[in-house]
Image: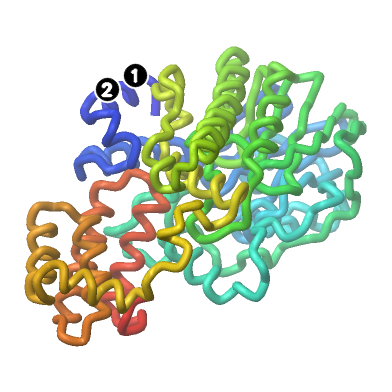
């Protein structure tokens, strides 16, 4: 989305609405459709010897052409997408693959390596810490898989799908990670310099979205490959599919170090490259500042004794960053980031003794019904909220009613389904939108338990 278009859209709703990514349905769709331009399938010539394949799957893959070989940066999610992208890149060079570099260990960047390697036996570079990038205990694999499907909208119909914020919807995932090849050269320390196929390459540790992240610098062409520490959307400082704490200070510092190189060309892990030197350096500086600002504001709120929910409502991007198209909350959101920072720094407890030992959900629901004057009145309040398009309040009341033996649980379930779709229609943050719709579909199809945990 260009800046003029973005500013025109943003004038159509208030700053308070912008903060929670809920706008009028027509605007939400228009914004998401505009974001589609960030991953239209194409090969972008970033520099005379650098080519980036965008939109062939969720992530980008790049080819650096050297004197007697090529270097591949990231390899997409599986061999099918990788083969298609490599065929497009081969229009620019048929030299053998001398090396592959993994910017981090997420499967959408590593799963197609075999399609690039072929029989060339390239060196495969990664950080020494390369490994479990999700930060989630393997014991949680069942629920992680469920939530992953919801966040990315993997089972949404074509009519429901928009995109994934930094990636197209409907990617081919049946061979996910089937082309993965393990690293053959693990980098220790903060930086490593080498020459591959006549190309001067610097690889620098860049912890951020993952602890094992790196960024690649080509000093001769002033091209920087950021991996997933930068893409053209507000960063996903917390993924709603569930992740361990992503150290946002490390993330901010890594992007700040990238900006110090003052690149002429910036290749993100997702979305379109930036091929203007002033824009590339400015974008990295803004990104680093935005992340650090959220951290600083959250810490101030914590030290004032505020709850994570209150802080999440209060923290905003600095005014001079709100008009930056690459900081629109298509992928990550400010409130989700704040909650993650709070929990990552201080744990779940907000310091309020009221929340130290709360009522059990069923008991709270019974008390809520008594307060409303009975279950019938609580049910009517839910229906009134939905009629007024107060969808979040309708959801919360439906979740109270589900616990009550004398409630119309089917009515509460249907109201929740409709309210989720109401929120989704107004949501321009792609993971939030996908999650609302996916959960509504699961409720409607009976996939979830009676109490919809």
Element type at mark 2: helix
Q: Position of residue 33 (x, y in %)?
A: 33, 41
Q: Position of residue 371 (x, y in %)?
A: 16, 68
Mark 1 crowdedness (10 Å alpha carbons): few <14, some 14-19, many ≥20: few
* Residue behind mark 1: 4
User: Image check: 315 left or right of 15?
Assistant: right
Q: Nearer the viewer, residue 200 or 12?
A: 12
* Residue behind mark 2: 8
423 w.r.t. 188: above or below: below
Q: Is residue 166 visible?
A: no
User: Image check: 322 left or right of 202?
Assistant: left
Mark 2 crowdedness (10 Å alpha carbons): few <14, some 14-19, many ≥20: few
| Proximity of marks 1 and 2: CB atoms separated by less than 8 Å | yes
Q: Position of residue 381 (x, y in %)?
A: 10, 63
User: Image check: 346 left or right of 357?
Assistant: right
User: Image check: 285 left or right of 10?
Assistant: right
Quarter-of-image position of residue 207: top right
Mark 1 vs mark 2, CA separation in Å: 6 Å
Q: Residue at x 34, y 67 (%)?
A: 439
The quadrant of the picture occupied by the N terminus is top left
Q: Residue at x 8, y 57 (%)?
A: 387
Quarter-of-image position of residue 173: bottom right
Quarter-of-image position of residue 391: bottom left
55 w.r.t. 45: above or below: below
Element type at mark 1: helix
Q: Position of residue 357 (x, y in %)?
A: 45, 68
Q: Which mark is residue 168?
A: none
Q: Residue furthest front?
A: 353
133 w.r.t. 147: above or below: above
């Amino acid at each position: 989305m260009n800046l003029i278009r973005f500013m025109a859209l943003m004038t159509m709703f208030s700053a308070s609405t912008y903060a929670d990514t809920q706008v009028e349905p027509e605007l939400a769709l228009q914004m998401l459709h505009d974001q589609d331009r960030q991953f239209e399938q194409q090969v972008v010539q970033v520099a005379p010897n650098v080519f980036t394949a965008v939109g062939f799957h969720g992530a980008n893959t790049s080819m650096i052409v050297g004197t007697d070989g090529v270097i591949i940066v990231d390899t997409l999610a599986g061999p099918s997408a990788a083969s298609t992208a490599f065929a497009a890149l081969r229009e620019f060079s048929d030299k053998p693959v001398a090396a592959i570099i993994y910017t981090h260990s997420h499967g959408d960047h590593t799963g197609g390596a075999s399609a690039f390697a072929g029989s060339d036996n390239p060196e495969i570079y990664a950080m020494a810490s390369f490994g479990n990038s999700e930060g989630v205990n393997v014991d949680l694999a069942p629920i992680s898989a469920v939530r992953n499907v919801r966040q990315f909208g993997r089972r949404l119909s074509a009519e429901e799908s928009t995109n994934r914020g930094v990636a197209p919807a409907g990617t081919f995932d049946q061979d996910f990670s089937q082309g993965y090849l393990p690293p053959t050269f693990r980098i220790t320390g903060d930086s490593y310099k080498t020459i591959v196929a006549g190309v001067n390459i610097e690889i620098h540790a860049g912890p951020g979205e993952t602890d094992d992240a790196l960024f690649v610098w080509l000093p001769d062409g002033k091209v920087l490959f950021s991996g997933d520490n930068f893409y053209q959307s507000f960063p996903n400082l917390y993924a709603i599919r569930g992740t361990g704490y992503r150290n946002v200070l490390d993330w901010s510092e890594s992007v700040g170090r990238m900006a110090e190189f003052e690149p002429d060309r910036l290749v993100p892990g997702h979305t379109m490259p930036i091929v203007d030197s002033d824009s590339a350096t400015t974008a990295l500086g803004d990104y680093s500042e935005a992340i650090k600002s959220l951290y600083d504001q959250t810490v101030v709120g914590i030290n004032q004794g505020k709850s994570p929910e209150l802080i999440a409502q209060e923290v905003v991007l600095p005014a001079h960053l709100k008009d930056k198209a690459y900081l629109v909350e298509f992928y990550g959101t400010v409130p989700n980031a704040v909650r993650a920072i709070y929990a990552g720094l201080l744990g779940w407890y907000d310091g309020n003794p009221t929340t130290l030992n709360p009522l059990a959900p069923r008991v709270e629901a019974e008390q809520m019904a008594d307060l409303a004057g009975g279950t019938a009145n609580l049910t009517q309040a839910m229906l009134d909220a939905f009629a007024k398009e107060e969808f979040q309040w309708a959801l919360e009341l439906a979740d109270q009613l589900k616990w009550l033996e004398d409630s119309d649980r089917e009515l509460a379930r249907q109201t929740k389904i409709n309210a989720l779709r109401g929120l989704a229609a107004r949501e321009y943050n792609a993971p939030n939108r996908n999650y609302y719709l996916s959960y509504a579909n699961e409720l409607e199809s009976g996939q979830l338990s009676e109490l919809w945990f």
